[in-house]
Image (cartoon, helix red, strand yellow):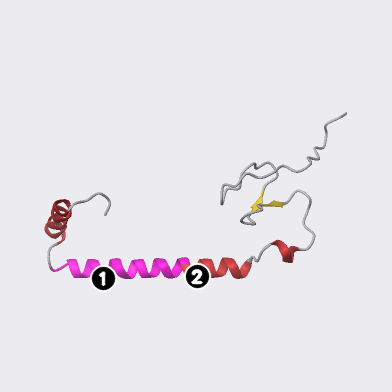
């Protein structure tokens, strides 16, 4: 567990006990547990909201030619990206249509 042995954990426990006292430890543990529960609940709600708000680009209809998506994870990509920031897959560059460059 993080490279900590029993002696290190015992020293940490003694320091926490000295700093906060035996009466306050149950309150600290309870508040830490409730904080973790609220954090997990918030993450789950955010993920549910994200999936319900923006389904894949199929509902957008005809997207502009400059919009691309990753072939593996379907993450939207900017025109100048060479790798997907989400999964790290190399993105193949299609035919470039650069405006302003002459013959």
Query: In the rendering, at what x and y percent does residue 50 appear?
Result: 57, 66
Height in image: 38 above or below 66? below
Q: Which residue corresponds to mark 1? A: 30
Height in image: 32 above or below 103? below
Q: Quadrant of residue 33?
A: bottom left
Query: In the rendering, at what x and y percent does residue 34 appear?
Result: 32, 70
Q: Residues within 10 Å of mark 1 (few under 14, many from 20)?
A: few
Q: Is 40 included in the stretch rendered in magenta?
A: yes
Query: In the rendering, at what x and y percent does residue 49 appear?
Result: 56, 69
Could you say which is closer to the camera, residue 22 or residue 92? Answer: 92
Q: Earlier in the sequence, mark 2 or mark 1?
A: 1
Question: Which image quarter holds the N terminus?
Answer: bottom left
Residue 83 located left or right of residue 44: right
Give, as a single range, the part of the protein colored magenta: 23-43
Q: Which mark is residue 45?
A: 2
Q: How crowded is mark 2: few (under 14 residues within 10 Å), some or many (20 or more)?
A: few
């Amino acid at each position: 567990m993080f490279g900590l042995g029993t002696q290190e954990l015992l020293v940490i426990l003694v320091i926490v006990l000295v700093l906060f006292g035996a009466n306050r430890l149950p309150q600290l543990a309870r508040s830490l547990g409730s904080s973790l529960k609220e954090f997990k609940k918030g993450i789950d709600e955010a993920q549910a909201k994200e999936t319900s708000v923006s389904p894949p680009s199929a509902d957008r209809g005809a997207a502009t030619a400059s919009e691309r998506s990753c072939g593996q994870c379907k993450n939207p990509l900017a025109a100048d990206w060479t790798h997907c920031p989400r999964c790290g897959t190399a993105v193949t560059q299609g035919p470039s249509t650069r405006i302003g460059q002459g013959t």
